[in-house]
Image (spheres, coloured by chain):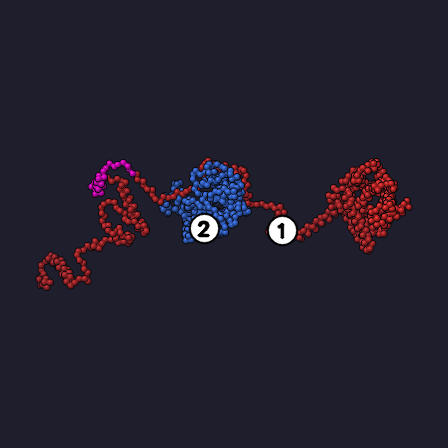
Amino acid sequence: MLRRNVRLRREYLYRKSLEGKERLLYEKKRKIKQALEEGKPIPTELRNEDAALRQEIDLEDERTAVPRSTIDDEYANANERDPKILLTTSHDPSAPLKQFVKSYCAEKQIFNGSYLQELKLVFPNSQRMNRGGQVISEIIETCRAHDFTDVILVYEHRGVPDKIVISHLPFGPTAYFQILNVVTRHDNKDKKEMGTVSEAYPHLILNNFSTKIGERTANILKHLFPVPKPDSKRIITFANQADYISFRQSGGPKSIDLKEVGPRFELRLYQIKLGTVDQEEAQTEWVLRSFINTSKKQKVLGG
Amino acid sequence: MAAIPSAGVEALHRLKLTEPPMYLTPSSELATAARIASEHLFASLKPYTPKSPFDRLLVDEKFDAEQIWQQIDLQSQPLISAIRRQVNKFEKDSQELKDIFKSGESDKEQKRELVLEEKEEEEDDDEEDEDEDDELDDESNEEEDEDEIEEDESRDGERERKERGGVGVEDKFLNIQEMKEFMEDDEAREYGVNKKKQVVKKMSRKFGEDDEEEDDDEDDDDELGVLELAGEEDMSDAEDARYEDFFTSTKKRDQSKKPKVSEKVEDIDISDEEETEDSDTGDEDDDGMGSDDEMKIDNLSTHEKQLLEQRAKIEEVERENLEAKSWTMQGEVNATKRPKNSALEVDLDWERNAKPPPVITEEVSQSIEELIMKRISEGHFDDVQKAPSLPSKAPREMKELDENQSKKGLGEIYADEYAQKTGLVSQALSFSDEQKKEASLLFKKLCLKLDALSHFHFTPKPVIEDMSIQTNVPALAMEEIAPLAVSDAAMLAPEEVFSGKGDIKEEAELTQEDRKRRRAHKKRKFKAENAKTIAKKPRERTETAADGKEES
């Protein structure tokens, strides 16, 4: 397992090093294509390599045409597998936090008087784990061993969940969000009114993620969910407004209606790191800087 | 009257002297003594009782004990209430009491005053009294007491009012005399606090000079002093105004005031004594200096007063500057540098750069729901798309089985195939067949090469479908394990390579006879070749040299 990891890491670094060269090539090919389309003569610097490049262009398909960026490389293989998520909390969680996390898991729903599951029901294909005394590195190791794709950690302040960390596992990116304005299913309505939450694979709506970082965040959130069936009736919405992402879940098991089911909260992204959670020295892709003077005007995720 | 009192006194004495057990048995002596004593007591108390129907106690033999007791009761009840009244009054007006005790004359005077006043009011309330007397036997004593207490209060009030001298619009809240004094105090405070003080100091000096005043003068001074000091008191009271001063009844105020006044009086008396004891010069000098300053302050103009105030303010500000600053003025302050919880008391306000978190209102939820509805109606979701996987295997060609019976017989089919192969029938091979063949051949070659490259996936040579035997196929090819590149199965056998005849021997293996034979063979060959060439040349040469050679 160790040697496999080492090998994967080396491959990744190699691909990263090739990235620069590939980009150059891509640029050249693009110029040639453009010149051909417009009917202009090929630029002089490319005349020597013109023939070889043209042959390559002819042989390209949609996959190879676009240069691969190692940044989104983490999700290259994600389309082929269904995601497998591990949900856990900070050390020594309080009871309301446990309820919140349970509600996001997709375990069997038990309508006891004592607890509702909130977070666990939201993500299909997810498992909840008690934190106990485990260190984060241990958690990541177990996840790698059991072939998980994502780890989600939820932290709290006096019973109210306030931070969520989504980490993609094979050395994937880690996104840190702040949770605000939590309204749990528990508070929302009576149990009897709501009924059970549908556990079908949901359709996703990701609205207003227009910048590059917005796209990246949308990717991260998107790949937590598996590919749904086309006739699925359950919808999960991540709507971005002024850098605050609203999460809503709607739709019952039988019909699509806007009857809101499930918890509702706001997320605020404050950091993206290019490693897993246990790699603290990993490169930060982006971090929120709220102390600069123009921070009010900045719209990082879109809008 | 003198004889009766003495007799009464005697009787009292006798009663006192008898021992208690004697009272158990009825004795006429004791009875008469008792009657006489009670009569004496009644007579002595009579001047003090306000209203008594009896001039003297009717104590004849014929009167019953009960009747005598009733008479005593008649006298004593009003007497007790009168005494109670007096005691209450003395409680309040301890000044009067002191006056009474100081000067015996005044005591008696006041007593007389009291009695006179009471009598005045008695005369005023005569009708009431008569009514009361009529109903005396029937009424209970308590009711009487109540009435009398009410009368007492009204009397007190009237008396005080008389002392004060107020007229017209007055009740327990508004008191014109007090108002006057208050206004004077206020004005004094505005224009100079010192006027009153001056007056007081004058008074005190007066006191100092007139050390050994007579009681009468002292009384006057006291009264004056009372008024002035009451004024001073009022000043200080105005500064510490209390609820009690406004909203309680006048009695309490008087109660509170009079003791103060009395204290002041005492103080002044003490100060008088001190001044007499100490050297007068010093005190008088001080008093003189103080008075001078006060005189100056009074004569300052408003401008100078303003200047003084400014100077005072400047001094205060300078003093503040010298001291340490408060924590709010100290720039960057941590929690450790300021007192605990002090930040809660200060109103903090600064510009914040961070956006405030959004408040989720109805409108926001509505807008989100609208968005969702729109997306649903469009069917436009941002789901994860499954990547189209590249086909690793070519899709198998589905051969459709022809279920119709073939028209040709089986034998005919074989005959046709044979004919094709042997080439007897030259068919016009279709284009696709030829190309197919070529393609398949090429592919087979390619596959062979690739298999040769990858060691682990050796596949044997492709089985040829036709019956003809290929030349030079190694017999052991099928069983050979070694890779083609290495194996020598495709090589020709040595006898196939050898193109010679018979048994081949090396030079070393030849026997003598074989060597001779080879030499002889060689010679014969050579001769044969030479003979041809000599025959061709002309016969001029003789047969001289050729014997030896011909023979061998």
**B385 left or right of B203 in image:** left
Determine crowd level at label 1: few under 14, some 14-19, many 20+ residues with C-alpha closer than 10 A.
Answer: few
Q: Chain of mark 1?
A: B
Percent coordinates x, y for residue B203 in the rendering: 82, 49
**Residue shown at the point (55%, 47%) measured from the top left:** A158
Whether B407 is among the magenta residues is: yes
Q: Which residues are magenta?
A: B401-426
Amino acid residing under circle 1 = Pro
Answer whether residue A3 is magenta in the image.
no
**Residue lying farthest to the front in this orientation:** B25
Q: Say whether residue B101 is visible.
A: no
Residue B531: % across, % down: 11, 58
Residue B510 appears left or right of B57? left
**Mark 2: amino acid:** Thr
Which chain is displayed in blue in the rendered image? A
Q: Position of residue A89 (x, y in %)?
A: 50, 48
Q: Nearer the viewer, mark 1 or mark 2?
A: 2
Disc 1 to disc 2, C-alpha distance: 50 Å
What residue is rendered at 60% in x and 51% in y? B335
Q: Which mark is residue B221?
A: none
The residue tagged 1 is B339
In which quadrant of the rendered image does the N terminus of chain B lie?
A: top right
The residue pinned by badge 2 equals A142
Toward the viewer: A185 or B86? B86
